Image (cartoon, grey):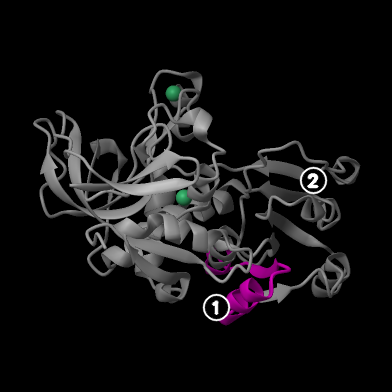
Amino acid sequence: MKASMYEGNQKIALHEIEPTEPGPHEVRLKIAYCGICGTDLHLFKGGLDYRIKNIPQAIGHECSATVDKVGSEVTDWKPGDRVVVRPLDYCNECVACKAGHSHVCANLKFMGIESPGAFQNFWTVHERTLHRIPDDLSLLHGALVEPLAVCCHAASRGEVKSGEYAVVIGGGTIGLMTALVLKYRGLKVVVSEINPNRLAKVQSMGIDTINPKETDVLEYVKNWTNGDLVDVVFECSGAQPALDTVPWLCHPRGRVVLEASYPHPMQYFFREHFMREVNIIFTRVYEAVDYEEALDMMSKNPFNCDDLISEIIPLGKVQEGIETCLDPAGKVVKIMVDCQSQE
Ligand SMILES: [Zn+2]
Ligand SMILES: [Zn+2]
């Protein structure tokens, strides 16, 4: 079978490898689609080499699939079942796992970084990572569940309530999907973004935008909320100029949810939060419940999933897909890899 493997030095190529037989609690999946994620871009540029044990390695983690073969102890799944994978491998023994927070396990391995990923014809995974795709959701759209679950988790971490005001900073894939989740949950949402292509995409999906290069975000927020300021800010840009605005945007006892990964030290003006007891909340990946919420949300069709898919490319073109995503023009929301089509 074919696998698209990261070789280091900004190189990804198709390799011929043997499919892995499923162990007793494992399931071999025939991968349908797998989205290219910001994490894959970071990995491609070498930023995660310290986490990859064996290069070359198959990467990718946002997939949909059908079950191909099940291990001897697997009872919940059978060949032909349509699934998505929650790509977290946790220890079940550390303090986080014992408290029920296995998504932030102290020994967490992210499948597609610390172990082989989904850009392959077949992928063998533990049965506990699987969620069933509802009948009315296609395999193509199912591959959007992983990034949507990131945003469902962020919304839950932010304890959002219907009717609240929210600013989302950054209109890339995660910012846009966060805004879609917040709107679905009944919040009033505006997205702050400077890239014209991203602004147009966010607007085309029915969400209001502000361009901080043209409009003062704090003034906008004051007018929008009759001077009250917003209940919650979602920071999805990871950019310092965004962090320079955030502390002023929400009201006393409001919440700031930091959704970016911040690989470098950043500056943040905490006094404004101290004065108003604003909570800063970090959010990372997802839990099983977030996958279920994302699947349920998508099967209710609150937005057109096709609007999020910019292009479908074959497994042999992952490198070109990543290079397209890296273009700062920001024309791409999600590139999907058809993992059964080689060329
Ligand atoms: Zn991802
Ligand atoms: Zn653990």
Magenta extent: 181-206
Look at the numbered discs 1 and 2 and tell me whether their residues touch, using CB distance below 8 Å. Answer: no
Amino acid carrying label 1: it is Met
**Quick one: label 1 or label 2, which is nearer the N terminus?**
1
Q: Residues within 10 Å of mark 2 (few under 14, many from 20)?
A: many
Within the image, what quadrant is residue 73 found in?
Answer: top left
> Depth check: 157 or 149 in front?
149
Amino acid carrying label 2: it is Val
Check disc 2 and report the residue beneath it: 278
Residue at the image position 22 percent from the left and 51 percent from the top = 121
Residue at the image position 59 percent from the left and 65 percent from the top = 179
Badge number at residue 205: 1
Q: Is residue 50 left or right of residue 246?
A: left
Q: Residues within 10 Å of mark 1 (few under 14, many from 20)?
A: some
Is residue 268 visible in the rendered image? The answer is yes
- SS under mark 1: loop
Q: Is residue 295 left or right of residue 278?
A: left
> Depth check: 245 or 18 in front?
18
Q: Is residue 122 left or right of residue 286?
A: left
* Up/down of 40 relative to 97, above or below: below
Which quarter of the image is occupied by the C terminus? Answer: bottom left
